[in-house]
Structure formats: structure tokens, C-alpha cells
Amino acid sequence: MSTLLNVCGTFVIVIGFISGIISGSFLGFIFGVIGSVVSSILFFALAKISDVQETILFQLQTNNHSSEQLYKKEANKVCVNCDYRFNSTMSSCPNCGYRR
Ligand SMILES: [Zn+2]
């Protein structure tokens, strides 16, 4: 995804330069280049955002997985009142509130 956006950004810069040169005037060239640079900055920013988002999603999944394992490891206390499995560090049942 980010590669595609980077390619689009570079492509927009090239198009801006070409259209600036084709326009023939100095002002047209400047506007073409500035316009293409501004649009390509948007593409590059989106590429960066999607990169960061993928990293965050990966870290969240890893974190979720490890906390699930931790929960499974610690969910070994069974409530005498309602048979609900919960964390052994808790002093009372989160399901019915039974305290032994
Ligand atoms: Zn209970």
C-alpha cells in the first residue's frame, strides 16, 4: 500500500515537471512544480501513515496475542458459586461477586 502511494507521489512530481515544461512560461513551470510537490507530499504522508498504521496493527495483534496467553495462564481460578473461570489474582468472582 505504501509503495503504491510512494510511486503515485513520484509520478505526480514527474507529471508536474513535464506539464510545467510544456506550459512554456516560467510562471506555469513554477505553478506546475509547486502543485505537484504539494500533491506528492500528500501521497508521501499517506504512505507514511499507512506504514505506521501497519506497524501499530502488528503490535496490537502481538500484544493481544500475548495478553490472551497471559489471561489463559491466569484464568485458572474457578468460582465455587457459578463455575466462572477467572484470574487467580482476583479476590472475588467478576461474574457473580462471590468472595471466598
Ligand atoms: Zn461466581
Image (spheres, rainbow, N blue to C red):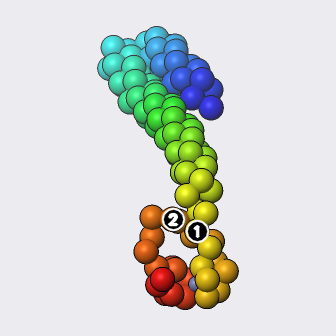
Position of residue 91 in the picture relative to residue 50 (left or right):
left
Per the image, label 2 sits on a secondary structure element best described as: loop
Question: Is residue 87 or residue 19 the one in the foreground?
Answer: 87
Pointers 1 and 2 in contact (C-beta within 8 Å): yes
Q: Which residue is mark 1?
A: 77
The x and y percentages for residue 90 are 45, 70
Residue 52 sits above or below residue 16 on the image? below
State the residue at coordinates (45%, 64%): 89
Vertical side of 67 occupied by 22: above or below: above
Q: Is mark 2 within 8 Å of ligand 1?
A: no
Q: Earlier in the sequence, mark 1 or mark 2?
A: 1
- The mark found on residue 94 in the picture is none
Task: Pinpoint residue 58: horizontal percent, then vertical percent.
Answer: 57, 38
- Which one is nearer the viewer's eye here, 59 or 98? 98
- Residue at label 2? 88
From where the camera sits, is residue 23 visible?
Answer: no
Residue drawn at x 46%, y 31% as measured from the top left: 48
Residue type, mark 1 in image: Lys
Amino acid type of the residue tagged 2 in the rendering: Ser
- State the residue lying farthest toward the front: 100
Spot occupied by residue 40 in the image (x, y as percentages of width and height): 46, 27
Q: Is residue 87 visible?
A: yes
Left or right of 99, for residue 82 = right
Question: Image quadrant of ligand 1?
Answer: bottom right
Nearest to the observer: residue 23 or residue 48: 48
- The residue under the point 33% across, 14% down is 26
Rounded to the nearest angstrom, the CA distance separating label 1 from label 2 is: 5 Å
Q: Nearer the viewer, residue 41 or 94?
A: 94
Is residue 44 toward the left or the right of residue 5 in the image?
left
Q: Residue at x 46, y 79 (%)?
A: 92
Q: Secondary structure at mark 1?
A: strand
